[in-house]
Amino acid sequence: MPAIDEEILRDLMQRATGDLHAPPAITTRVVTRSRRRHLRTMGLSVTAAGLATATTIGLVAAATGGAHRQAPTKVVSLPNITLTAAQRALNKLSLAAARTAPPAGRYVEMSELQGSDKRTSVIDSQTGDIWTFQQGQGIPSELPVYKHWSPTLAQFNAYPTGVPALRALLIKQAEQQAAAGRKAMLAQLRKDQKKLRAIRRAFPEGPKETANDLVFAQATLLLWNPLVPPSLRAALFEVLAATPGVVVNSHAKDSLGRPAVQISRYDSASKYTNAIYESPDATRVLETASIYPATKAHDGVPAQAASVLSDTYQAITWVNSVPANPYGG
Amino acid sequence: MLRVATLLTCDPHLAEDVYQETLQRLAARWSRIANPLAFCRRVMHNIVIDASRARRRRPAELPLFDTHDSGDPRAGDPITAVELRPVLLAALSTLTPQQRAIVVLRYFDDRSEAEVADLLGVSAGTVKSTASRAVAQLRTQPGLTALLHTSDPKGDGLACHR
């Protein structure tokens, strides 16, 4: 009886798979999915997509290596790109944002409502530092200064404004922030192994956020930041227009009843909907909201009713000197 | 590529999915890829590793019946292939995904040790030792050795290719 050596193994593998050929249905599915992807992102030219797909099919036929190669597939001409209503609304916001004059002043003052609490934050556009005054029951009247809380105006001006480059940057930033957050949390929890184990049991690792989830979260976070210049806001709307799953309601109202454009997206990993309410003139975000659906009780976790957590921004003003505490603290 | 996918996954149906996903990624990144075949090999390996990790987290699926496929009529010797395949895939499935990848790339795809090492991001020494251990492991598989034992003595049996 011969022993199994490399030559025999090679022979076995060749013979055992000699009759395998890729079904044409697979390449058809790849072509269809590629076409959908190109239509969605609108980033690539129609011709390049057709050529790439056709070349892929040619490569597959060559790579299967059999004598029975398939006939070359025809390059299919793709239909004209049709924008969805959401994409048209976002492109409109992008144009409006691009036409906005950049604000003048060093400090930006944002007043907001969180439930019944009032809060005013002052951000230094040159350093990115933020300090916050508050008014409400059981909360401190002032929060400690958070150094370099935001990129500065100059840093924002250096951000790319092309859709692919900006999208890649947003994904990178979101991943870095998530990694830093996880690291900090684990560093804290490692001191208490019991707690760490309990948390891991209670929150098993769920589905990971997709690139589109990260892009939406990061883009809306930047749109909210008042230091972001109009040109970058315009580019962010374009990025959102190229992100699948974004829903736009152009005739929405925020919780104060102001007319707004609601831009939302369901985050499949976190299982809730993130929304921002943009002013119709595309100058600022009026409200941000996290909309949680009702959940049933499971594995000891009680059922929860549907809920909305929102922050409403009343006014944003730019000034040249440090503003005083508006609540007289 | 489908043959490589079948050997890597030991599951003809999963292999088709892996193959399709590989093509999908290739098409999506076509303009940025210098060496498409190397890209496909690497991507295919990554998908198989990811799929095997994901499978470990899910309850095992039991096949409803034995899936002895009938082979492709275009192939030269479909009967031999259909007879050999279940035995070979069963033997390969006893290896780890990494061992399988090395065996397939090294002996089926005829890549040198250096090429396999570069592709999988490991050292050439690791490739050599892993391949050696994997072959030793395959030698202990009763199905494979029985197959060799009963191979055709007239001249087209496996032993005659040595």
Image (spheres, coloured by chain):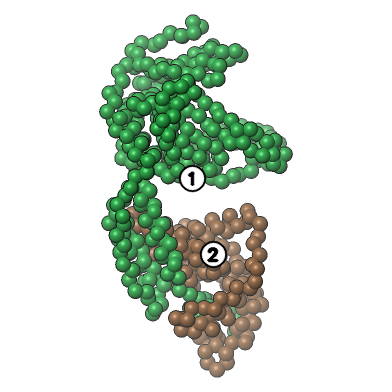
Seen at 65% across and 71% down, the residue is B65
Compared with B112, A190 (above or below) is: above
**Residue tagged 2:** B14
Which residue type carries mark 2?
Leu
Measured from the top left, where is residue A69 in percent x and y?
37, 76
Q: Tell me where residue B140 sits by quadrant.
A: bottom right
Residue furthest toward the right? A300
Tell whether label 1 touches label 2 (CB within 8 Å): no
Which residue type carries mark 1?
Thr
Q: Chain of mark 2?
A: B
In the image shown, does B51 or A301 lie closer to the viewer? A301
Q: Tell me where residue A225 sits by quadrant.
A: top left
Q: Colour of chain A?
A: green
Secondary structure category for the residue under label 1: loop
Seen at 64% across and 67% down, the residue is B63
**Residue tagged 1:** A210
Q: Colour of chain B?
A: brown
Residue furthest toward the top? A328
In the image shown, does B51 or B92 lie closer to the viewer? B51
Q: Residues within 10 Å of mark 2 (few under 14, many from 20)?
A: some
Q: Tell me where residue A104 sits by quadrant.
A: top left
Q: Chain of mark 1?
A: A
